[in-house]
Image (cartoon, rainbow, N blue to C red):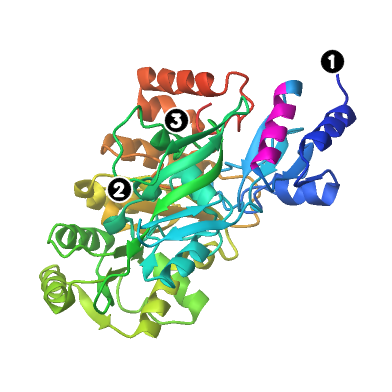
Amino acid sequence: MTVFRAFSNQEVLDYLATQVTDGQVFTDEETLKKYSFSPRLTDDDSGLALAYVEAHTTKDIQGTLKTARKYHIAVIPQDQTTSTVIGADRLTDSLILSTAKMNRIIEISKADSIAVVEPGVVNGDLDKEARKQGMFYAPDPGSKPISGIGGNVATNAGGMSTVKYGATKDNVLGVKVVLADGREVKLGGRTLKQAFGYDLTQLMIGSEGTLGIITEVIVKLLPIPLGTPVMGVAFFDNMTALAKAVTAIRISGVYPTMLEALDGNTVAALDRYEKTHYAKNSAAMLIFKLDNGGQDSMAVVKKILAEQQANDVKITTEPKEQAALEQLRRDMLPAVFAGQNHIMEDMAVPLSQLAPLMDYIQELSKRLDVEIYTAGHAGDGNVHPTLVWSTSVTEVPEKIIIALQEMFKKTLALGGTISGEHAVGMLKNQWNNAELGEDVDMLQHQIKALFDPMNILNPKRKIN
């Protein structure tokens, strides 16, 4: 189709350069290829972004959005580029807006139990700085060493300690956001309670950059618990038995910090990756941690594990051994992904439905002859099945697609969600009606239209 364009790409870029005065604008092919795509999800090198904007200040963000409004161009927000759902990949001729260089820890206030940070601050770096003052930042996604707080907020990232301390949304008190029309607004604040007005802070959390660009975040910090943390592993004959033990521990009153489940396939993959020998013990592995509570709490956990017929239970208070166990869980993904095509999913169900979902995934794997590695944050009902196939097959096999669809439908039938902590992006934006229903689906689009009437902020993500 013939298109009579009002402005050339060069005119757009020339104007953009006048609006981004503190940061940098990149248009070279090498940079655009590097940041246009998620390397784990696509190797397509066509349809690059028009420019990559490295914002250093709020003014740069406002200038980028002003350009986008003037020329009707999509803006794709990026932070540390760790999305697993095609949430920050380019659209052709879009402007990629990176806040990764906005990475200052502005304040750590022990007295107020908060930190004020820019979006590019890496989660693990904030936690390290807080610990120097006897505090810590609780949310700990698997990407903790590399993901930014801004991205964590945009996706409502979870993690291993969610069972006790909640997800990102439970640890954010306020944000500053640049809206699509260029206004920077302050939402929430430094107080631990706030009941005035509609809760727009929580609306922004998990919005995946479709409602505004985060420029500052106020997060809660917690005091490091007293006592000696205790960690351990236990093995079970199957994931269903493990899920039942998790439920018993979860409601026992011991308040575990971590309850992580790995099926036999995943443990075997870790053995290959780490040169360990866990897989010989059993078909399912539970990694658990208590950061306080002492011997009384550990006695309760031991009793439950015995009642649930766990075997080879090992418990340690040694910091190095605990760090090794935590690293074992963090290495789950590279271990499973190594040398295979893969899709990792992210469903969450009510705790009472965890065992039925585990049963269903095992049955589905056998029925469709699909290799599935299942792990997840069992303490909060969050399951991460990873479906793999040979690297010699370039297209996603039909049976993989069918397996994913059936898992999603089963999860929803059990009262769950098909995105517990990894967001929606473009991988699951077709499922809004199925999960939310027609009325709420429409309401989501109305909210998007109110905040972003020109549809320039991360279009096609979150809702389609």
Mark 1, Cα crowd under 10 Å, few <14 / some 14-19 / many 20+, is few
Mark 2 highlights which residue? Answer: 360
Mark 1 highlights which residue? Answer: 3
Amino acid type shown at disc 1: Val
Amino acid type shown at disc 2: Tyr
Mark 3, Cα crowd under 10 Å, few <14 / some 14-19 / many 20+, is some
Q: Nearer the viewer, mark 3 or mark 2?
A: 3
Q: Nearer the viewer, mark 2 or mark 1?
A: 1
Span highlighted in magenta in the image? 58-69
Classify mark 2: helix, strand or loop: helix
Q: As drawn, is 5 to the left or to the right of 82?
A: right
Q: Is residue 47 above or below residue 110?
A: above
Classify mark 1: helix, strand or loop: loop
Q: Quadrant of the N terminus?
A: top right
Residue at the far front: name it.
111
Give x and y (percent) for residue 445: 48, 21
Q: Is residue 281 above or below residue 185?
A: below
Q: CA distance from mark 3 to mark 2?
A: 20 Å
Give x and y (percent) for residue 410: 32, 39
Give x and y (percent) for residue 165: 30, 56
Mark 3 highlights which residue? Answer: 431
- Residues 403 and 423: in front is 423
